[in-house]
Amino acid sequence: MEKFIIEKSSPLKGEITIDGAKNAVLPIIASTILTGEKCIIENAPFLKDVEIMLKILEVLGAKTSFCEKEKRIAIDCRKISNVPLPYELVKKLRASFLFAGPLLSRFGKVNIQMPGGCPIGIRPVDLHLKGFSMLGAKIKQEHGNIEIISQGVKGNNIYLDFPSVGATENIIMAAVLAEGETNISNCSVEPEIVDLAEFLNKMGAYIYGAGTDSIKIIGVPEVYGAVHSIIPDRIEAGTFMIGAVITKGDLIIKNIICDHLRPVIAKLKDMNVDVEENENSIRVHSENELINTDVKTLPFPGFPTDMQAQFMSLMAVTKGTGIINETIFENRFMHVGELNRMGADIKVESKSAIIKGVPKLTGTQVKATDLRAGAALILSALVAEGETEISDIYHIERGYCNIEEKIRKLGGKIKKTEE
Ligand code: EPZ
């Protein structure tokens, strides 16, 4: 298995252009099932998760192509059939469950495996299934297999007990071709929901209120091919912002939407970091002594749980003590053990981590336990004394495009080796 070998690096300096958002492109790929016409997705990130979603579409009979150089995906679902999704691919990523809504909408029947838990939590799909049954579907679950059948999806009013991102996306996609109107309240307001709704509306759907906590979908008989450019990845942008600060560097991060980064900008400013916003770029540097802070992860527009691990790396080497309260996932502190192996001083008590800043970390062998934990370890390794070896880097490559090349261009000492 491949590893990253990282040495203590000089401050990261220069410019970095952010790729399209993983968590926007994945539901948009799933939604192309809704039409028999060709769809083009621009500014698509070339990620492992994207490759797997396209492979699943091909098993269904779709034609897909991904031109990495042009960052363009073409998908034609004209000839798809409703075969059961391949478990060996479904189990690789949670987002595969996002095929359920569009398949229910197009075929009235879905046969899909529970995508299984992942390191950061059990990640049930009860809110997705509740939404489908509110739209008139019958749900049968047996030994991890889920069968969803409807005699035609009918619009309804749906209240989500929790503003689940995936459940909001799946219910929207299930409701697009429904008979009548669907209102989803207490839904997710993440930017990725807005991007999905924009793509669906370009296809001819009628979706109102995306980005607010109540969304209306007026069902239409058919939707058509569309072209759409994916929003920038706010989590990749946030990760490089931390990279600038933790290495005492100076980065200009381009192709971003500052409004998607408000909580990260605010918390960095609390720590005495200089953040200069421009039209679609941001400059991050800090000559001042940093002050530790507290973070509570919340659904958007709160502090993103997907930035929690990366922020912890920065807090671990910042003077003073800070507390992180992780309210979204029940097991998203696995990077604590790895950071402590590098000399960090972090204690976990239930859903909170108490981080006591230490003057330095020391390189050693560590393991990426999940995608964002892996990114956090890269950030820590860039400032740790000596050499750090990160294994299980496939987690990281699921969500970051050519991360080692991007970091090397900014002065980071990182290379990939075969184990
Ligand atoms: C999306 O996951 C993202 N993934 C996650 O990003 C992100 O951390 C998460 O939203 C929260 O922002 C994609 O978009 C592909 P949720 P999702 O449904 O949709 C519970 C990354 O690092 N829940 O909002 O699965 C669930 O267990 C990944 O890029 C239920 O209880 O997140 C969790 O505790 C990690 N029942 C909470 O809600 C349900 O039916 C948030 O989950 C659904 C969710």
Image (cartoon, helix red, strand yellow):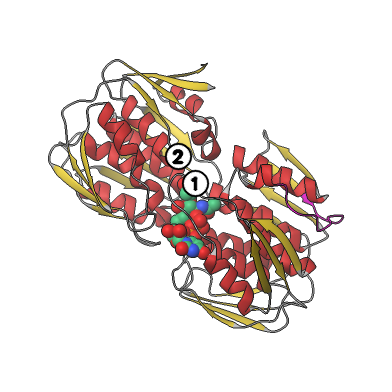
In the picture, measured across the screen, residue 143 lies left or right of residue 394, that is: right
Name the amino acid, label 2. Answer: Asp
Image quarter hosting the N terminus: top right
Mark found first going from the N terminus, 1 or 2 = 1
> Which circle marks residue 282 in the picture?
none
Asked whether mark 2 lies closer than 8 Å to ligand 1, one says yes
Residue under numbered circle 2:
370
Kind of element beneath mark 1: loop
User: Residue 21 at x, y = what percent?
Assistant: 54, 48
In the picture, measured across the screen, residue 359 lies left or right of residue 115, that is: left
Asked whether mark 1 lies closer than 8 Å to ligand 1, one says yes
Kind of element beneath mark 2: loop
User: Residue 49 at x, y = what percent?
Assistant: 60, 42
Residue 285 visible (yes or no): no
Of tags 1 and 2, the one toward the viewer is 1
Disc 2: CA contacts within 10 A as few (<14), some (14-19) or many (>=20): many
In the picture, measured across the screen, residue 399 lies left or right of residue 27, that is: left
Is 320 part of what is drawn in magenta? no
> Which circle marks residue 118 in the picture?
1
> Toward the viewer: 280 or 118?
118
- Inter-mark Cα distance, 1 to 2: 8 Å
User: Residue 249 at x, y = what percent?
Assistant: 30, 30
Q: Which residues are magenta?
A: 75-86
